[in-house]
Image (spheres, rainbow, N blue to C red):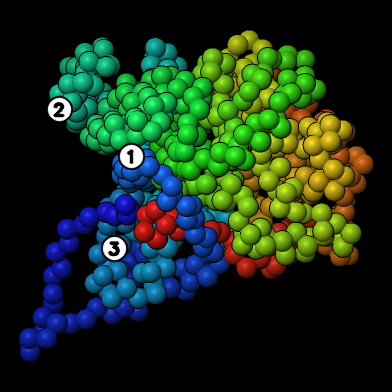
Amino acid sequence: MTFKRVLLVFLLLVVSPAGFAQAPDAGRLPPGYYPLEKSRPIVEQVGTIRLAPDLSDLSAGERIAVGKLLEVGAIFQALYEQQLHRQALKAYADLEVLDRELGSPEATRNLLMLRRLNFGPITTTFDNRREVFLPVEPLQPGRNFYPWGITKAEVDAWISAHPDDADAILGIRTVVRWADAASLRADLARLAAHPVLDTLHPGLRQGLERRLAAPDPKGLYAVPYAVAYADEMIRAHALLNEAADAVAKDDAEFARFLRNRSRDLLSNDYESGDAAWVTSRFKNLNVQLGPYETYDDDLFGTKASIGLSLSRVRNTETAALREALRGLQALEDSLPYAAHKIIRADIPIGLYDVIADFGEPRGINASSIEPNEAYLTRSYGRIIELRANIIDNAAMFNAYQPAWEAIVAPAYRADRTPRGQLNQAMWHEVGHYLGVDTTKDGRALDAALQDDNNLLEEMKADLVSMYVADALHRRGYHNDQELRSVYAAGIFRATNEFKPRRDQVYESMQLMQFNYFLKRGLISFDTASGTISVDYARFHEVVGDLLASVLDLQYQGDKPAADRFIERYTVWKDDLHGVIAAKMMAAERYRSWVIDYSALGQ
């Protein structure tokens, strides 16, 4: 099954008086398109890896299910790009037309690669600025989850005056609109076209009709994703049920999950699917399917982006891993905070080979843990997926090794190992399973900490991966060298190749760790050589102190305090961080990666 978008293109041939077609000038692009001199340096530093897991032993039904799920993925990819920028899909279609008209020169091929790299018309420059590379409007913090260009102050003002609207407007799976007549009529038309949605969302139609009776172009309202993307969700619902029918005889639990998730897409309530996903044991296939991560919402950090990740289970290795992870309660109890919780004895964790990704999960992320909503995690737990054919990809590991060797003193260059990287990634995800999940007064962390939540949660997970390494070493899980390699992976993780923007979750929390480690003497910087040294003997103590601070911020749910903490440790100095960043970039062949998926014919 290949990932294709069918475009109907009518090319107008410009004919000279002599009757000959005039070929466009392939060296010049229309206004608004990145010129070759800007696109070439970025594309030259994009590496490619290919994922081609062996699917030959899947049953006929499982192979049919794979094909259906890839179709759902294609739908979700288009929705994701629509969520990121309201002009993304048209801009990409126009670019494809231009590429064909010009005979696919390097200039347009580069722009197609940038689109693939960025999932839309916005790229990041080498100095970490966001720029449009296609003729579209500049990116807005609220993306296309909110009215285009709206400010946080405007949303806050509306919620303050209309508190009953708060849950819908800040909901994880809603699209916020201006309450003008055209928008209201369009949403009512979607309900009329799909009566099942009217049934599954009681009161929504009546509420829209009341607003339409007195439309307010300066007012706000919200509709669930199921309605905002009604046509796409209805089609995805049908495909998931077809996939379930195909695989039912081979894997009844997987089929039940697919049917539950198909209903979730229409109800906008994902509890049934998440419960089945987390508590079931599938045979050969697994799929993360739906809106989960909220990193793309720079306005409030509450809107989840749509995506799908289809994978093949590594059954033998997964069984061994689950056995090795028994005893998590003792690790939870060892964390430096008081309000400990009860951890499930057998957490759903597994090693997987990625078949294909779409939307938010697409990329070289090593692992994931879902769901994120606190009431779901308390009731059913979370599933941890380690993306083995990305984690153990030798080309990627080797590509980053020169950067590590460039920034550390010679005594530490051999400390970074593939096993250390694997354990850091694995225990980072387990770290999400441990620690604070609600504030002391019972609020969800995302509601209490808003745009700080993701940063603190990711930093907590990083710190847990390093903190529990000491206990695992004492158990015999890590030998001396493996413990050192986990620590080295954590240090390398805390370095940055550029000064992060405040909205960059991972890069910001990495900078915070680096600055804290430097302040506490865990690492030191030699200005003469421009390299880092590490005091491994202090690792557990210093990491534990920072982890305690992060856990307390989460437990208190005090956003102003979190803001101050983040500001204190996100200081960037060109004569320190800038030196390290420059050495890393000079040593690396690639600065970013794209993936070719054999399942998509790539």
Residue at left 22%, top 15%? Answer: 199
Residue nearest the observer in this picture, 542 or 54: 54
Which numbered dot is residue 145? none
Question: Does the image show residue 235?
Answer: yes
What element does badge 3 sit on? helix
In the image shown, does 117 or 324 lie closer to the viewer? 324
Query: Which of the 4 quarters of the picture holds residue 309?
Result: top left
Q: Position of residue 543 (x, y in %)?
A: 81, 35
The answer to which of marks 1 and 2 sits earlier in the sequence is 1
Residue to which mark 2 is pinned: 193
Q: Give the residue at mark 3.
A: 96
Could you say which quadrant of the image residue 121 lies in?
Answer: bottom left
Question: Mark 2 or 3 closer to N-term?
Answer: 3
The answer to whether 288 appears left or right of 473 in the picture is left
Residue 376 in the image: state x and y as whole percent.
51, 18
Quadrant including the C terminus:
bottom left
| Side (left or right) of 69 relative to 365 | left
Q: Residue at x 14, y 82 (%)?
A: 21
Dot 1 lies on which element?
A: helix
Which residue type does callout 3 highlight?
Glu
**Rendered position, 351 above or below 334:** below
